Amino acid sequence: MRIALLPVLLTLACARAPDVIAIDILLDPDPVLRTEALATNARLRDNYPDGYALGDDNAPHITVIQRFVRASDLGALAAAVDSVVRHTRPTSLRLTATGYYAGTEGELALAGIAVAPTPELLAFQAAIIAAVQPYAVADGTAAAFVPRADGGAISAPTIRNVNIFVPAHTGADYFPHLTVGLAAPSFVGAMLQEPFTPLAFSPQSVSIYQLGNVGTAQKRLWSSVGGAAGRSQPLPSEVPLDQPAPDSFLVVFETTKGSVVVKAHRDWSPLGVDRLYHLARNHYYDGVVIYRVGPTASFKGGYVVQFGIGNSGAVNQAWDSTGIADEPVRHPNGTGTVGFARAGPGSRTVELAINLTPNTSLDTVSYEGVVGFPPVAEVIEGMPVLESLNRQYGNAPLQQWDSIMASGRSYLDRAYPGLDRIRSVSVTKTWPRTGIR
């Protein structure tokens, strides 16, 4: 599988790149934890204005491991990390930010938010360590880091920490955390005495960054979602689309608001059920944004939940030409029925729409030259979860279709912050085929 890398890798390869670079393989926080980190960083900078600012050039993150690696190995390393992400699904981890912590950086206090380690997080770290080990090198120097903007030296503790991270900060000694900034020790000490309400979260993505001074995530080299980054979603060529699905099966969608269980019915839409089965089995929907909770467009009076746009433009482009043939409506579009969204003929690909109301007009409506929207499944658990999804933007994202298709989740996160998403998807039960086609 060819792994696409961010343009910065081309910069590293062409502009007197160092032979060795210092990298951080990290978890990107979800919007709730990121917002908390940015707010705390702003407080710290009010106390110590010369402290660093979190943002695009200094990403809030939870380090998994830090290593020195050869720049020439970055492509192979990204592929190895991508494989781990595909098999372990770290965006489905359920983690908890437990409170503030403090360390020292010279005469200042270094503050952060601690995250409770879990067996699943430790297993993910172990898998990443094993994947990166063939590319790791020892005794890296300051030349491996992103240079400081002020021209100053990379601190000795920064260099040492990368050299010893594996094994010194792994396994039982792993302390997952999100560093938020520098301030006077007295200010940070007072902050530690404040009450902190634990924050439950799941990582938004996995990224590889080149490190800057004091362990800052300075240059993103690869990400499991977004733009030209690496991806964790399957392409059509990686999915056995020509193989028939079972007659019926259960799919569990773990959302940011809770679980939704749907049951597929082959007799409702054989081709649609085949497509749903293979997308779910191959984790296509893991991490996607639930970008629409709004009224139906093809007729007035209905309400739907819609998701399925890929996490990157490359994924969207690949699936856009894989539409399945149209089928007649064999089961009414009642509350909780699930079907594929479509435009014109043969355009059902990956997007799912779930009816929040009895939308039986969808059975017979003529839309874009095709009659009806055939259901493929029904919700058997989790309708209250669907009702609770963020609906503040309604159908507004549909007006930015080209941008969403081009950039996927990265655009949705920027333009429509706070939308819910699918954390993970699994097929939990199947019923054998009886020959229905």
Image: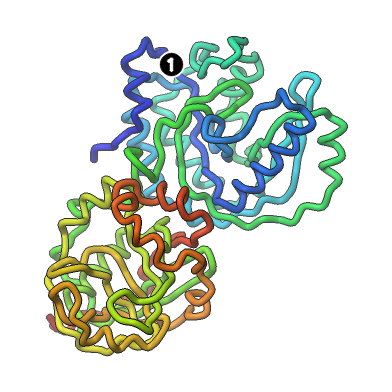
Lateral position of residue 364 relative to residue 202, left or right: left
x, y percentage for residue 146?
Answer: 51, 19
Vertical comparison of 411 with 370: above or below: above
Quadrant where the N terminus lies? Answer: top left
x, y percentage for residue 255?
Answer: 48, 65
Q: Looking at numbered disc 1 in the image, what kind of residue is underneath it? A: Val
Where residue 347 sits, quadrant-wise, is bottom left
Look at the image and name its color scheme: rainbow
**Residue depicted at 58% across the width and 30% down the height:** 167
Viewer-proximal residue, 166 or 55? Answer: 55
Quadrant where the C terminus lies? Answer: bottom left
Vertical comparison of 289 with 275: above or below: above
**Residue depicted at 17% across the width and 72% down the height:** 368
Tell me the residue that label 1 is attached to: 20
Viewer-proximal residue, 433 or 75? Answer: 75
Viewer-proximal residue, 301 or 146? Answer: 301
At numbered mark 1, what does the secondary structure look like: helix, strand or loop? Answer: strand
**Residue depicted at 48% across the width and 26% down the height:** 210
Crowdedness near tag 1: few (<14), some (14–19) or many (≥20) residues, C-alpha within 10 Å: many
Lateral position of residue 340 relative to residue 124, left or right: left
**Residue depicted at 47% across the width and 27% down the height:** 219
Where residue 429 sits, quadrant-wise, is bottom left
x, y percentage for residue 254?
Answer: 47, 66
x, y percentage for residue 86?
Answer: 37, 49
Vertical comparison of 40 with 212: above or below: below
Viewer-proximal residue, 120 or 242? Answer: 242
